Amino acid sequence: MLNRFRTLPSVIRRDFNVYSNLNLSSKTQSTTAVRHSSTGDEGHADNLHSGETVSIPAYAKKTNETIDTQRARLVYQSRKRGTLENGLLLSTFASQHLGKLTTDQLNKYDVLINQPSNDWDIYYWMVGKSKVPQEYDNDVMAMLQEHAMNKNNEARMFQPSLE
């Protein structure tokens, strides 16, 4: 494995080194900043020294936002995820359901897609591979899980077009 790792392009090795140091199991994360340049020399991201930790800030709810602005932001955030799987599931969900959600449901959806720091957690909750934490186990999560089941066998190979 190590020999195969050395043959990977330096960009992939760099990303592997950065992401393998992430601890994404708690709400407030910290990570060790290490970055390798394309020449293989160890560099530092954003003036951080090797081994220095950075905290990922907690999600701050948006205030003074109209319902239309919130819907538009949530459509955008549903489309621009860290993984293709979530991008497809959340963007198709947003396209079908955001216009019909109540203000309370929109707020729950907002917290659900923005508060967890790991997109894979959201994906595993939606598809039923992991138990949903109590704080996210609500009617909107039930709707997302139903959507992920795709009982109508819809083709979801592309994100829906913006209207």
Image (cartoon, rainbow, N blue to C red):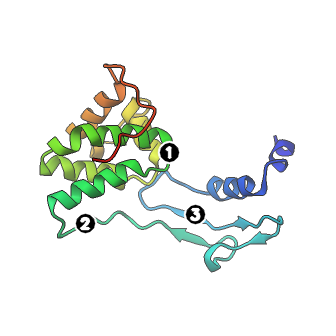
The local crowd at label 2, few if under 14, some if 14 to 19, many if 20 or more residues have their Cα within 10 Å, is: few
Question: In what element is the residue under mark 3?
Answer: strand
Residue at the (36%, 48%) spot, across then down: 78
In front: label 2 or label 3: 2
Amino acid at the residue labelled 3:
Thr
Between the residue at mark 1 and the residue at mark 2, the CA separation in whole angstroms equals 24 Å
Q: Earlier in the sequence, mark 2 or mark 3?
A: 3
Amino acid at the residue labelled 2:
Lys
Residue 70 visible from this viewpoint: yes
Residue 54 sits above or below residue 75 on the image: below
Residue picked out by circle 3 = 31
Residue picked out by circle 2 = 62
Question: In what element is the residue under mark 1?
Answer: loop
Q: Which residue is outermost to the right? A: 3
Q: Position of residue 71 (x, y in %)?
A: 22, 54
Between the residue at mark 2 and the residue at mark 3, the CA separation in whole angstroms equals 25 Å
Locate residue 86 relative to residue 40 in the image: left or right.
Answer: left
